[in-house]
Structure formats: structure tokens, C-alpha cells
Amino acid sequence: MFPSQACFKSNVSSTFSKVVGSRGRAPDAPEERKLSMHLKARTVRLAILGAAVVLVLLLYSLRLMQVQVVEGEMYAQMIDEGWSSTQTIKAARGEIIDRNGRPLAMNTIGRDVVIDRAFLVPGSTNEVVLKLIRIMEEADEGWIDNLPLTRQPPFRFYEGESYAPAISTLKRSLGLNENATPDDVVYWLKDRYDLEAHGSEDNPIPYTDEEFRKIAGVRYEMERTNFNYNNPYTFATNIKIETVPKIKERSFDIPGVDVKESTIRQYVSGDVAPHIIGQIGKIYKEQWDEAIKDGAELVNGVTYAEIGGRKYAMNDVIGNSGAEQAFEYYLKGEDGERQVLLNAQNQVVDVVDTKEAVPGNTVVLTIDSQLQKVAQDSLERKILSMQADLITYPEGEGHEADAGAVAVIDVKTGEPLVLASYPSYNLQNFQKDYTMLAQSKPPRLLNRALDGQYTPGSIFKPVVALAGLNEEVITSSSEVYCGQIYTRFRDYQPRCLDLHGHINVIDALRWSCNIFFYDTGWELGIEKIVEYANRLGLGLPTGIELQEYTGRISSPELKARIHQLGDRDWQPGDVLQTSIGQMDTLLSPLQLANYAATLANNGKRMEVSILKSVRSYTFDKVIYEHEPKVVETIEADEAFDTIRDGMIAASRIGTARSIFGEGLYELTVASKTGTPETAAYPNSTFIAYAPAEDPEIAVCVIIEKGWHGYTGAPVAKDIFDAYFSTKGRSPDEVNYVRLLP
């Protein structure tokens, strides 16, 4: 017996004798009664505690017996077999097809170059990256580099509005303010990634400017994709099979680098509508950090966050431009799970799929890929011919043309059939050609059909004609005298290109008379011009699901906002210039095509949607079906009929007669030309719809520095030829490309 136990027993006995006494009488004193009650309570607690201990020991014994006897065999088997692991089954991304079922973006097996940080020697990242870059250059392969800094010194930011967000992000990541210069960025990149020199401390070798830029591009991308021990970095995707052994045989020199099979995006015709289809890529750190602010979920050791209604892991692929981004919700599949059982030697014993992967849905665009190809080829051919033909297009009169865009709208539904930009690029080679694309002039990555900002010029005149007719400022027969000089104001007298004499609205549209529209616009006032422009869809979002420039219409408010202090006051001449599509008005080709479609539709403006439908991956279920939607109706049938007559006259015997003139073209085309002035050379703007009697499609063609408005008419003609020559035939029977000259 332990001393404490003996002491406790003796004390209890002594106390008991004193309390009870020799005859067992109850104590009379209060102190004695308190002591008795305390003793009883203490005795009860000890009894309860003892019983609990006994119970626990009993239950433990029973559980031990169960483990040893009942479950012993099972646990012995598990110990012998090893352990199990839960793996994610990546779901296939949904495909993108055109309105006729022709594939635009599909999935295939590719090969990615991956860097695993767990195998990198500390401090060796730059050297490994540089060696890997040299291997890729020898193999004529590209790699991922989204650093918005030119590849050659002196290093400068890539120009263009499309790069502004990337430049801003770069500055923030380096802790710099928005006013930081490219030289500031270079300094901090060198400091951040230790890119001054390599080699030993005793023999440092400075990086060349080119080496610094290449490594910096990779290191920056590594940081943005949160490269760490649990998140390998994808250096390049879809490399050639011949490149694989060149990397493998250098594995001793580039530890942590490996080539792995992956599901990659294949663009069937990479040069067809690349701006519209868009691209996919890894989730960037900024996007991930923003997503986890709303909470994250840990599943099987993997952190997931919600982006746009879907769950993503940190290194997942996501759409980052075009349709790939706009319809990410439909294209993203639901990952599955499998349980992998391994034995003690880490050999796989069994694999069981516990949750089936659900592939993404198929997105059907309104684009007609073959008609898109016709438009792209026709636009390119026209621009190149202008550059080569110095007789027809001498210097200063079209020879400088170098870019353009085409938009084609289904008049009845508001569905875009064509959205083409020139110069363009090939999605299949995007990674490899990125440096060239980023530095190209004019910019190849700019989606001119949606994001181009163009002064419309005379194709704006139907707006003023409609407003004048509907507000009864003019009638179809009222005339204005064109003496070539507008004389309403003594100190401001703009001109017309020709002397037209007395002219009505139909002939004013036919010959594009400035004087008629100066006078009509002045009588209307700027408020009415802006109102009708907006009602026709100009300066407003079209409704398309992709990123677009929403446009702007010249007005006193706009001028006060965008001009310098000394030039902010609205002048009478500003109304005149707005009336012929000049001043501060800027519009996109898509807006202008939808505007032409609204004219063709007698004032019924449709919401533009590029999403025709969404089907299940196996195409057996309809997830979504687009229903055409009218967003504005202008009740002015007589006015629209008059404008149609004027636009037909422009095609038959007016400014577009060389292409659609009487006896030259079978279809009746309603058109309007424009030659808006710019800071450099005048652009060529052209809108048209056909057939004029019962319109089906509307077209807008823009040629930068095209000089004459009718320059774009041959491109529209190629589109009309292709579209109407195949009308009524099944998609399988149609090959637009064969129709090209």
C-alpha cells in the first residue's frame, strides 16, 4: 500500500470514530453534522468514479477483443496490402462547334513540358529554365510567356489597349505604381528573380539582355500560376513528338523537368475565327486569390474554389478569352474520383472509380465557319492587292491599307455569321508565335470586329435621314440645294465633294451629299441625332456574350469629357460634323452590321447573341436554345422604305455602282459607303444588306486607310455570292471555299 493510501485510510477511520461515537448516536453539534454530510458525498463520488473506471476497462477489453478476433484478419490484410489514395479524374472539356456542326475546338492527347519544384536544387531555377529554353529553341518550339514586355532591348511595354490590364497587373505584382516605366519594371524583375548574373560567387557571369528577358518571362508566369511543391509549372504545351527525346536525354542537366501526356485543346482550323474562339490557360494567381476570398473547400487534400459557378483546383485550366471564356460555365466538366489501392511495395493492387467524371457540354456558336473563311480570305486578298497595285491605289490613296474587319448579321435573328479581323493569327501556333504576335504592327491580337473603334463617316447618314423623316423635319420629296459649300454660317463653311444642285433624301443617300445632311442635322439638333443613333443600336451594347467596344456618339457631354480644356465647348459646326459621321463618334464593325440589319428590318433591332445552343457532350440533351429577342422597334415604315430606296440607288447607280451596279450584279443590294477622315489616311467603311426586297443578311466591311468607301464592296460581294449560292443546300453539300476566285 502506498503511503498516501495508508494515510487516507487512517484519517477516515479516526474521523469516523469521532463522529459516530461508541454507541452509534448521531452527532448533535452542527460541525459534526457538516462533517458527516461531506463524508457521505465524498464516498458517493468515489463509488461513481470507481464504477466508471471499471466500465471503461470493460469496454476497452471488448473493443480489443473485436479488433483482435473479429477484425484482425481485415486489418492484417490492410497492413499487408499497404494504403489507398484518392485521385481526381479530370473531366473532358466541352467542345465548340459552328452553327452547322463543324468542329472549332476539340480535345486531343498532347505532350506538356512540366517543371516540378520538388526536384529543383535550391537556387537553380534560373539555370534550369535557361537550359530548357535553349533546348526548346534548338527544337523550334515555343513556350508560355505572357510578360507584356518586348523580347528585344530596349525593353518596352507592348502597345495597345489590349495590353493595358496585363501591364497594370505586372506593375502591381512588383509593388510598383501605375506610373512606373519599363526601365523600372526591368530593374525590379532582375532584383526579384536574381537575374543579374549566374555561375559561382567567385566567377559570376552576367546574363545577357536576351537571357534575362526569356528567364523573366518564365519566372513571372511561374509566380502568377503559384508554382510550388504541390503545384508543378507547365512550361509548354502540345510540343512535337520529336522534341520529347531531346528533353528526356538532358534530364540529368535539367532536374525537375519532365514531359507528361495531357488533354489539350485542338483547334481544327486554327486560322478560322481565332479571336472569336479564344484560348484556355492555367488559372492565374490573381484570379485564384480573388476566388478564395469567398471561401475554399478542401477535398482529398486538394483545395477548391468557386469561379463563375464552377469549382476549380488551383492548377486547373480555364477559358481566358473569346468563347472559351464567355461560355466557361457550360464547357467546364465535373471531375470524378477514383480510389487507388497500393500494397506495401507501392504497387497498385486495385483501382475503383468512386465518382464518374462528367464531361463539359458542347457549345454551338452562330458562326458559319466556312462563310467566316470566305470573309477572312476576301478581306486579306483585298488589302494585299491594294498594297501591291500602285496604279489603282497610289500612295496616299489606298496603298497604305493594312488592316480591317468584317461583321455579318442574320437580319431575322440577330445572330452573327461572320466576325473577321485582319491581320489575324493561328490558334494552333499561338504559344510559339506569341512574341511575334504581341509585337506585330498593326496588332494581330486585336479583335477588330468587336473591339475596333472606327469613325463611321457617311454610313452614319441613314441615321440622320431616319430622324429627319420620322420627326418631319424633311419629307421624301423635300429638297436642299447643294452648291458644294454650306453657307449657313459665315465663319464656318464646310464643303461637299460634289455640286449636286437641288437634291432630295434618296439622291442624297445615293451620292452621299454632305450639304443635305449638314442642313438636316442642323434642323434636327444633336439631341435627336443621338436619340435615333441609340435607337438603331449605335453607342449601346449589342448583347453579344463576348467582350465588345460599346461605341460612343458625338455630343456636347462627350466633348466636354474627352477633350482638353481649351476645346471642350460645343460649337455649331460640331452638329454638322456629327451629322455626317465625323467628330467624336466611334463604333465597332459589329455595331455597324447590327445597325444595317435594323435598317433592313424596318426598325426592328434584334439582340445580338453568338450562342446558338448548348448540347450535352454526347449531343443527346439540349441544355440551352437561343430564342431571338427584339430589343427595340421604331415605327416608321415609310421612312425606312425611303432609306431603302436611297441605299438601293447607292448600289445601282451611286457610290457602290462599280460592284453592285445595274446589270453587274443579279441580287438587289442596299448599301452605303463612307470615307471617314482619321489622323492618318481616310478609312473605308461600307454597310449593305441583301436581298433588298426581303433582307436575310447584313454586312459591314471596314478597311483601315482604305481611302474610298466603296473599297470594301468587293468583300461584301464575295460574302453575298457564297451565302446565296448555297441557299437551300444542306451543310454537308456546302463548301464555300471552292466558291472563292
Image (tube, grey):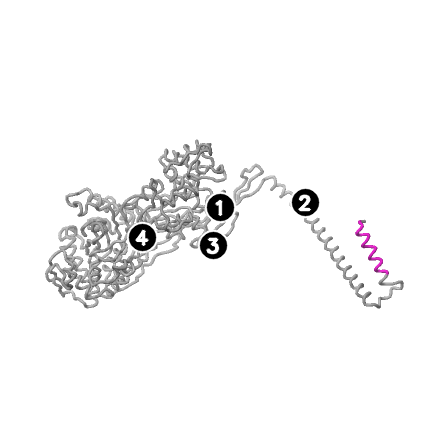
On the rendered image, what quadrant is the C terminus found in? top left
Which amino acid type corresponds to the residue marked 4 in the rendered image? Thr
The residue at 82%/52% (across/down) is 6
* CA–CA distance in space, label 3 to label 4: 36 Å
Please report the bounds of the magenta region as a residue range: 2-17
Please give the residue where the numbered disc 2 appears in the rendered image: 69
Label 1 to label 3, Cα distance in Å?
24 Å
Residues marked 1 and 3 touching at CB (< 8 Å):
no
Sequence-first tag of 2 and 3? 2
Q: Earlier in the sequence, mark 3 or mark 4?
A: 3
Q: Position of residue 414 (x, y in %)?
A: 29, 57
Q: Which mark is residue 293?
A: 3
**Relative to 441, 265 lies left or right:** right
Question: Would you say residue 400 is visible in this rendering?
Answer: yes
In the rendering, which numbered label is found on residue 88? 1
Image-based side of 38 in relation to 230, left or right: right
Three-letter amino acid code at disc 3?
A: Lys
Magenta part, dominant SS = helix
Q: Is residue 708 left or right of residue 538?
A: left
Q: Mark 2 or mark 1: which comes first in sequence?
A: 2
